[in-house]
Amino acid sequence: VYPEVIADAIMDTVGCSPFYVQFQNNSTGANTHLWDLGNGIISTQPSPDETYVNNGSALINVPVTLTSTSAFGCTDVFTSNITVYPQPVATFVANPSVQSFPLTVVNFTNTTAGTWSYAWDFGNGTTSTNQNPAPVDFVNIGDYNVSLVIANPYCADTANQLVRILPPPPVAA
């Protein structure tokens, strides 16, 4: 009877693109290891690392397999999935972004691709978590830094835009 081979590994399994993963091989009873990193990369290193990239708009799951083999030819297989979220790119349009008082209402359109959570800060004390918020009334003359943070549990991005409410134009007498 040959010693038992147990293939085992630990690694972070969920992250945002580009997602760097360090594989820690915890196999016992084996002297060779063959990793299929699920993206066309094969490694014989005991504990390789790899960066997973997701250029799409939806998460991807990458199957990873570790085959551990003893000097007697006994093998065991460990499998896991690496989940890679796409890197978001926050974008929005403020319309109009510059106007003169007393015109102070600005419409915001989220132009971000994908489905995320949304956190708007309009720079005037008001916020929203709507994908496309209601029009915002900037009641005072001034500059307002408007930000949109989009996120999922693993990734986030922020877009900023200046909204300017100018003093009223002079009135001819």
Image (spheres, rainbow, N blue to C red):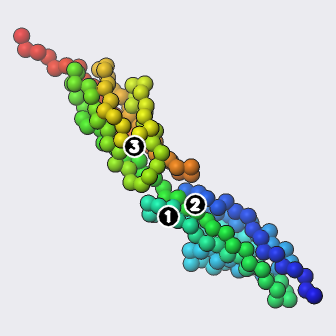
Amino acid type, label 2: Phe
Q: Along the horizontal axis of the image, is 103 left or right of 115? A: left
Q: CA distance from mark 3 to mark 2?
A: 26 Å
- The disc, 3 or 2, on the residue closer to the chain's N-terminal end is 2
Residue located 39% across and 43% down the image: 131
Report the residue that reaches farthest toward the top. Answer: 173
Q: Residues within 10 Å of mark 1 (few under 14, many from 20)?
A: some
Circles 3 and 2 in contact, beta carbons < 8 Å = no
Q: What is the tally of numbered marks visible in this picture?
A: 3
Circles 2 and 1 in contact, beta carbons < 8 Å = yes
Q: Quadrant of the C terminus?
A: top left
- The disc, 1 or 3, on the residue closer to the chain's N-terminal end is 1
Please name the residue that numbered disc 2 is placed on. Answer: 19
Q: Nearer the viewer, mark 1 or mark 3?
A: 3
Residue located 22% across and 24% down the image: 103
Q: CA distance from mark 1 to mark 3?
A: 23 Å
Residue sitting nearer the eye, 125 or 169: 125
Q: Quadrant of residue 3?
A: bottom right
Q: Quadrant of the N terminus?
A: bottom right
Amino acid type, label 1: Asn
Where is residue 113 drawn, in percent x and y? 38, 54
Residue 54 — which label? 1
Residue located 49% across and 64% down the image: 54
Q: Residues within 10 Å of mark 3 (few under 14, many from 20)?
A: some
Where is residue 5 drawn, in percent x and y? 84, 79
Q: CA distance from mark 2 to mark 1?
A: 9 Å
Where is residue 111 drawn, in percent x and y? 34, 48
Secondary structure of residue under mark 1: loop
Please name the residue that numbered disc 3 is placed on. Answer: 131
Where is residue 108 drawn, in percent x and y? 32, 38
Secondary structure of residue under mark 3: loop
Secondary structure of residue under mark 2: strand
